[in-house]
Amino acid sequence: MIEPAVVVLLLVLVLSLTAYALLGGADYGGGLWDLLASGPTAARQRATIAHAIGPVWEANHVWLIVAIVIAFTGFPRAYAAVSTYLHLPLLVALIGIVLRGSAFVFRAYGPDDPQHERFWGRVFAIASTVTPVFLGIVIGAITEGRLPASPDGPFVATFVTPWLTPFSLGVGAFTLALFGYLAAVYLTLEADNADERRAFRNRALISAAAVGVLALVVLLLANPEVRGALVDSPWAIPLHAATGVSALAAFVFLWREQYGPARLAAAAHVAFIVWGWALAQYPYAVRPHLAVADTAAPVNVLALLLQVLGVGAVILVPSLLYLFGIFGPRGSHGHDVSPH
């Protein structure tokens, strides 16, 4: 029987990943739209993206740190397997996270020179686009179950082949589309110009369609075990129904230019996807060798970790709510869209 502390930690871990997808994921998506900004409002789009991300992008990474701490401390064997066999895509994602943050700051606080802004803007946008792809590849590799049981084989077979698969690459593309969709929906509320808002709305509608197509592609690429967990589990029908309803609601609200409800529906859509993946993955931490129960730390360690997380939550959650209450959304207030 699985320990109650393990169940609670799993719930907190999935909640942290959900928060990171909804907040940090939207920041990555903002970088994608920075890269693809076009039309007469392109400069305004980039300025709005920078203005929206600026106050909160560092705080949003707190949720990733929480998830890593839970995995490292609470499920050390699973963490060791993932960080060992998937160190290459994790390294690319880590470099992307560092580059996008550095470039964002260098662009904002560097010399008032268009060439300087253009260079660091490109670095920020490309790193923001590449990083979620590799984060998705890691999730795909953990889910697909091709990680070896031991690191004794050839380098390519052990450290490259397990994640360089159509399914993992499909999950990477799906993750990028999902974050782009979320960001575009959020940015409709940040824009204070009708043409700019319309551009983000069009991107949101297009990326919503891309999310649907890529979700089907990922399902078709999944192996029978993963597909069965996603489709045949007792929770599958109600969860997929909720996901479909939230996706349809977001599409309708966007079409009718009701951006507040669209943001809530899009956030629910993404949250249901994250929880659907987590339920499909259970009882495995890393399929097929490591079950959650077998990778958990001793009970005394889990209890101490839960206590630390509880104390941290008392400080962290109100602070983040206060931060977001101050800074967003700002589209209805008007703001200066200059790059500096």
Image (cartoon, rainbow, N blue to C red):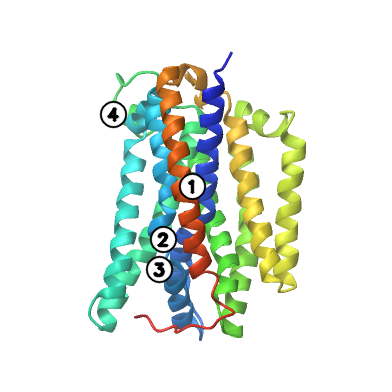
Q: Residue at x 42, y 30 (%)?
A: 305
Q: Which residue is mark 4?
A: 155
Residues at discs 3 and 2 in contact (Cβ within 8 Å): yes
Label 1, on which residue? 172
How far is the residue under mark 2 from the one under mark 1? Answer: 21 Å
How far is disc 1 from disc 3 in space, using C-alphas? 25 Å
Is 245 placed above or below 8 here? below
Q: CA distance from mark 4 to mark 3?
A: 41 Å
- How far apart marks 4 and 1 lie (CA) works out to 22 Å
| Residue 164 visible in the current orientation | no
Q: Mark number for residue 55? A: none
Amino acid of disc 2: Trp
Q: Which residue is mark 3?
A: 54
Q: CA distance from mark 3 to mark 2?
A: 6 Å
Within 10 Å of the Cα at label 2, are there few (<14), some (14-19), or many (20+) other Cα atoms? some
Q: Quick one: SS at disc 3?
A: loop
- Residue 105 lies, in percent from the top left, at 30, 68
Give the residue type that dot 1 points to. Gly
